Image (cartoon, rainbow, N blue to C red):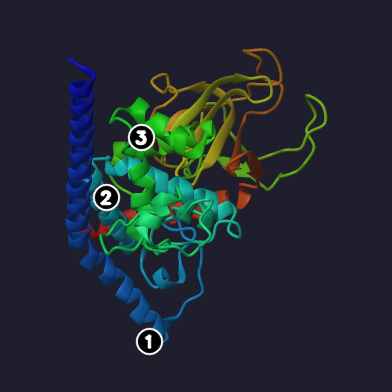
Amino acid sequence: MNRQHFEVKYELEVAAHSMRYAIRNVLRTAALVTAVAAATPSVQAAAASSIDARWSGSYKHYVSSPANNEKPQSAQALTDADIFKARKELYDRISMATSIPWFRIAAIDQYERTISRVRPKARPQLGQFVGVYLSEEEWTGPLNPNKQESSPDAIRWFGGKGKDGDGDGVADRTNDTDLLYAAASHLLKYGPSEDDFSIGLWDYYHSSRAVQRITQFSKIYENFGKLDLFQHSFPVPVSSNFSYRSTWGTGRSWGGYRIHEGTDIFANHGVPARSTCYGIVEIKGWNPYGGWRLGIRDLNNYYHYYAHLSGYDKSLKRGDIVSPGQVIGWVGSSGYGKPGTSGKFPPHLHYGVYRDRGLIEWAFDPYPLLRKWETDERHRLRAARKANRSKQ
């Protein structure tokens, strides 16, 4: 084959490849527009009901809830169930258009929400129902002189991440669908496997911590198949004999100067220790301070730390998914020495909670949470007993 023929063949192959790429993009966009159009009425209806409620005199101040720790004002009048439903429909439609499983999209959105919650000034809420955050520079492109740019073509030209997700010709940084599609479309460059998902997340966040958290959230959502996963239980059965008080910040007597980062729940040796949340087992094993200890990560990006156990549920291992009230081990007095050390203090469960800020984790006093969870569980038990009596 002479050089002229080779060049002609090469140009034809390039043209064919470009045509295939263009056709795929057109089909993908058409599928997304169709999917979003089907989802829009119910999502808009939810938003409209909220706005109507606000202007009819029921304008409420925001109170933190498990469903949405950073509710935008236009969603304040909605119930948690309404918000979960609106989000799930958005996830499903974006999933349908991109072939990315809904639970992976949900995991990205929830991780973004947890980071915005601890940095609200730097990461204000953009969408109405989703938590994805992209700065103006990230959305429009680092060299784009117009930081309010909404033209998808111009944004693409400047290397921005902004996308037109609903097919209206505008890449709106405050539009839920555009925000979700911008985050999800990045993953389209990678394969469908879990490893491909992790690689795509690393390329997007450049943080192994973010990759780990989103992967964990994805597994939790996939396991339960729903979004409403924020109920809690007390760490030991409320029917057992136990006592606790706020001991946050008190000094410790072993291992050098340090403060107490948790609450000690005193109970008899062998009393079940239970998961307080829906989550995933992150750590399991011996620690010189905490003895036999176990750590669970939940969807609020809280790390729940259980220490001084006498043993674990033998079937439980790292990476397992747990539910509120599930037995994970038993109260003991292990710790303050080499593996197996026990009996240096009365049996109790040390319970701590740590919040992930994106780069570091910091502990906070779990006592108020424990009081609330104990009260809530007692109320649920009383309600269940009352319901059972009414059936008899």
Left or right: 14 as drawn, with respect to 122: left
Q: Nearer the viewer, residue 77 or 16?
A: 16
The amino acid sitting under disc 2 is Ile
Q: Nearer the viewer, residue 193 or 365?
A: 193
The Cα–Cα distance between marks 3 and 2, rounded to whole angstroms, is 19 Å
Quadrant where the C terminus lies? bottom left
Left or right: 236 as drawn, with respect to 386: right
Q: Which residue is mark 1?
A: 56
Q: Earlier in the sequence, mark 3 or mark 1?
A: 1
Provide residue 235's location: percent of width, then percent of height.
51, 40
The Cα–Cα distance between marks 1 and 2, rounded to whole angstroms, is 33 Å
Neighbours of disc 2 within 10 Å: few (<14), some (14-19), many (20+): many
Q: Earlier in the sequence, mark 1 or mark 2?
A: 1
Judged from the image, the secondary structure of the residue bearing numbered disc 3 is helix
Residue 249, image quadrant: top right
Q: Nearer the viewer, residue 6 or 72?
A: 6
